[in-house]
């Protein structure tokens, strides 16, 4: 689980749904406060998580999906790797001309 979808109830209690990859790279949502689990797609994850928090726990708010620091670092490394590969390809193509 690499992301969190959070919402706050009127009395200030925070509720959280975790989002990430389960076995076989399937995207899964899992509630931290009950047994709710659901398969999802990337675009639907936040919506589904919020729906559950609202319906099952009465928690609303301005929820946002936050990445854990390690996941964010990994994303940056992957982006840097892609840029490096692209630079090599461009350099190679230019040197062939
Ligand atoms: Zn729940």
Image (cartoon, rainbow, N blue to C red):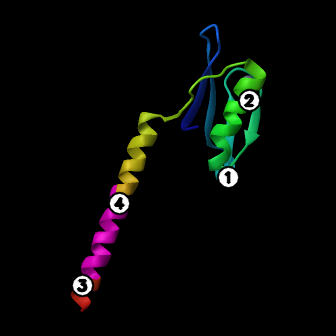
Mark 1 and mark 4 lie on one chain; the one further toward the N terminus is 1
Please, is residue 82 above or below residue 48 in the view?
below
Q: Which mark is residue 24?
A: 1
Q: Which residue is mark 3?
A: 94
Query: Which one is closest to the eye, mark 3 or mark 4?
Result: 3
Q: Quadrant of the N terminus?
A: top right
Q: CA distance from mark 3 to mark 2?
A: 53 Å
Secondary structure category for the residue under label 1 = helix
Q: Which residue is mark 2?
A: 52
Please report contact status of discs 1 and 2: CB closer than 8 Å, yes or no.
no
Q: Nearer the viewer, residue 16 or 47?
A: 47
Query: Which one is closest to the eye, mark 1 or mark 2?
Result: 2
Asked whether residue 85 is drawn in magenta, I would say yes
Q: Which residue is mark 4?
A: 81
**Residue at position x 65%, y 42% from top?**
45
Query: Which one is closest to the eye, mark 3 or mark 2?
Result: 2
Residue projecting furthest to the bottom? 97
Task: List x then y, in percent, for residue 48.
Answer: 71, 38
Task: List x then y, in percent, for residue 32.
Answer: 67, 24
Magenta span of residues: 80-92
**Residue at position x 77%, y 30% from top?**
36
Task: List x then y, in percent, for residue 23.
Answer: 68, 47
Q: CA distance from mark 3 to mark 1?
A: 40 Å
In what quadrant does ligand 1 lie? top right
Please, is residue 11 above or below residue 91 in the view?
above
């Amino acid at each position: 689980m690499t992301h969190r979808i959070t919402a706050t109830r009127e009395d200030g209690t925070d509720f959280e749904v975790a989002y990430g990859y389960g076995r076989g790279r399937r995207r899964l949502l899992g509630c931290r406060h009950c047994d709710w689990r659901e398969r999802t797609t990337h675009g639907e994850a936040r919506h589904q998580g919020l729906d559950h928090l609202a319906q099952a726990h009465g928690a609303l708010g301005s929820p946002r999906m936050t990445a854990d620091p390690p996941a964010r670092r990994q994303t940056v490394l992957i982006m840097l790797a892609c840029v490096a590969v692209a630079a090599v390809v461009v350099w190679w193509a230019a040197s062939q001309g």
